[in-house]
Amino acid sequence: MHKSVRRNEVKMELKIGSHVGMSGKEMFAGSVKEALSYGANTFMVYTGAPQNTRRKELKDLHIEEAKKLMQEGGISEFIVHAPYIINLANTVKPEIFELAVTFLDTELTRSAAMGTNVMVLHPGSHVGAGIDAGIARICEGLNTVFEQDQHCYVALETMAGKGSELGCTFEELARIYDGVKKNDRLRVCMDTCHINDAGYDVVHDFDGILEHFDKLIGIDQIAAVHVNDSKNPLGAHKDRHANLGQGEIGFEALRYVVYHPALAGVPKILETPWIPSEADPSVTVPPYKEEIAMLRAAGAPVYPG
């Protein structure tokens, strides 16, 4: 059974969207068009390919056109995801750490120029050096980056605990907060698949999860929620996303998360797998229009208290 939890009494429209691409001639304007085609009122995007440092200049992203499209389409907020190649926890290869610090600084500047104030970041992997060394390195990197005055929060993503990933417990995230001097620049992105795989019982005790998080870090620090089902059972530490209702968490538990009053106004972002096309099963297509419609049609469940 779900327990009661501190709630936001202000009723807000569900802010729901998905990851979208950014490519071709339209770039960021195309990203907004994609989000609107899904019926979304928020979205998440990378500023370039997540696997490398190659980036188009800001003038080539069609930012002003994108902002106009957002205003016309009722999108007031979006978030950026940092590239996967940033690993602030690496203590083994100094060049990897230095690249992470430099590129994170650049990406924060680009994100702010695009019009967001939230960038989601995987905390990093300690690659064998141990949790303590990895967390210390993350704090060192963030302290260096935050010496600059970017107008963008870094939202540490909750991780599944695969390999040497850090940030799979709220305690680890709290230690990063404690080690960062300007921790008012930090926020958290809660991923439902990741916390399930890390051992947090989303299905039976999401209120308890929020209460635990609130004591350690504070619910007001949650700047985004990644809404994903999981192909793995509780505590598997594997991180394999499933479509809504097609995994171990299930649709009803995810609906409970999405509409939770304590998370009202927080962007909910789908990162679920693409699915086979009905016209040609050998081709995959995004499921986001249908999944967003499912969540909206279901509406909010009844919450205790």
Image: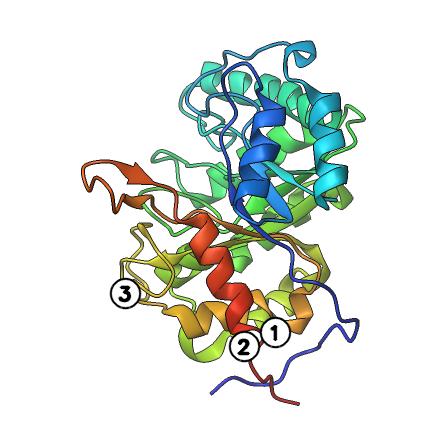
Does the rendering let one see residue 105? yes
Residue at the extreme front? 279
User: Considering the numbered disc 2 on the image, is that residue within a helix, a strand or a loop?
Assistant: helix
Q: Give yes or no for contact between labels 1 and 2 (Cβ–Cβ under 8 Å).
A: yes
The quarter of the displayed image where residue 105 is located = top right
Locate residue 122, reporting x and y percent.
50, 39
* Mark 1 → mark 2, Cα distance in angstroms: 5 Å
Q: For mark 1, what is the residue?
A: 211
Which of 299/7 is in front? 299
Quadrant containing the C terminus is bottom right
* Mark 1 → mark 3, Cα distance in angstroms: 22 Å
First along the sequence among labels 1 and 3? 1
In the image, residue 125 above or below residue 289? above
In the image, residue 87 above or below residue 207? above
What's under tag 3, amino acid-wise?
Pro
Residue 208, numbered label? 2
Taking the spot 63% from the left edge, 39% from the top edge, the residue there is 79
Q: For mark 3, what is the residue?
A: 233
Q: Is the residue marked by circle 2 packed among few (<14), some (14-19), or many (20+) residues within 10 Å?
A: some
Q: Give yes or no for contact between labels 1 and 3 (Cβ–Cβ under 8 Å).
A: no
Q: Left or right of 290: which side holds 180? A: right
